[in-house]
Image: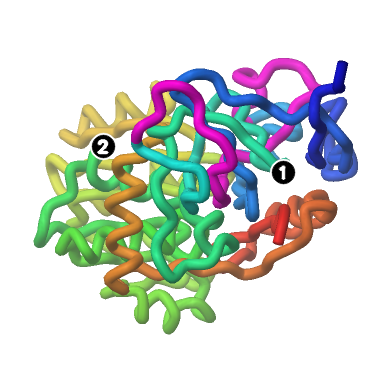
Amino acid sequence: MSSRPTMRAITQDALGGPEVLKLAQVPRPEPLPTEVLVRVHSAGVNPVDWKTREGGGMAGALGEPPFILGWDVSGVVEEVGFGVHTLEVGDEVYGMPWFPRQAGAYAEFVTAPSRQFARKPTGLDHDRAAAMPLAALTAWQSLVDAAHVEAGQRVLIHAAAGGVGHFAVQFAKHLGAHVIGTARAAKHDWLRSLGADELVDYTAVRFEDAVRDVDVVIDLVGDGQDTTSTRSLKTLRPGGTIIAVPSGVSPELLETARSQGLRASAFLVEPDGASLARIAGLVETGAVSVEVEAVLPLAEAADAHRRGQEGRTRGKLVLRVTD
């Protein structure tokens, strides 16, 4: 009897620093009905990855190690399960399967429901496509589904030069908003090229002293040490909305917002193949571009985490799994 096929993957047997990430051979998954098996060409690296590696992020959903990190996937359909009608073997796809449960994107193969994927944007290579799903869906869903941004509104985006931020700038502009971003001065020209109307260097001025009458704040920093969410309430006009992405909404923030006639909402991204298809269309028409700072081999996942945790990445980091 033949043994089950194996694949290369980055695994971790304990929570901790980047050094816990190891290249190993693990069993290859098999698709269930309604699922597809995707040969992963590239996998995006996101802040939730290293937070989870350390025991935060989505570690509670994954359970105790060992597990395989990663949710951003771009690759080719290798096999389809019974009941799949939207994809075929050979289709180039991208997606954010299973989030927040384990997807195992840091590996040569993943399986997931076919409708959690979409066809990769035409003309975009796998490295750039892998940089998109989690970040682009976070930006799209926070603006469209959570904040209900409309044309003519003023939208403030914190960490505008990051993975989620640079998509949020472009999507907000596509929706017809007046876009304000916070970022270091060195990144202002690039963000203007993406559609930002106003930019604030948060290292030179307190943003709440420079920005007023905002309808929507997309906070990609969180309350943490700099209390960005709480300070952002001062920028909102009556009836305005803040979507707090990384740290959620504390009871104190919620009460303060309500007392000022504002809305504060937490946010967590969901797998969404239909929205990925819409986003692919925007990429194909040139309305949205993807920024990748570096592409590293799968075996250098630990180095990618170290680099990402420095917090100075422009756009995204990507792991190339197979050529």
Is residue 226 covered in magenta? no
Which of discs 2 and 1 lies nearer the camera? The answer is 1
Q: Which amino acid does the dot numbered 1 rest on?
A: Glu
Q: Residue furthest bottom?
A: 189
Regarding residue 232, the answer to whether it shows in the image is no
- Write the residue at 23% across / 60% down: 212
Secondary structure at numbered mark 2: helix
**Contact, mark 2 vs mark 1 (Cβ under 8 Å):** no
227 or 10, which is in the foreground?
10
Instruction: Check the image and report above or below for 283 versus 93.
Output: below
Instruction: Check the image and report above or below for 248 versus 152.
Output: above
Instruction: Check the image and report above or below for 215 versus 26.
Output: below
Label 1: how many Cα within 10 Å (few below 14, some 14–19, many 20+): many
- Write the residue at 75% across / 33% down: 54
Screen quadrant of the N terminus: top right
Secondary structure at numbered mark 1: loop
Q: Which mark is residue 108?
A: 1
Q: CA distance from mark 2 to mark 1?
A: 34 Å
Residue 208, quarter of picture: bottom left
According to the image, label 2 marks what residue? 146
Q: Which amino acid does the dot numbered 2 rest on?
A: Ala
Q: Which residues are magenta?
A: 57-85
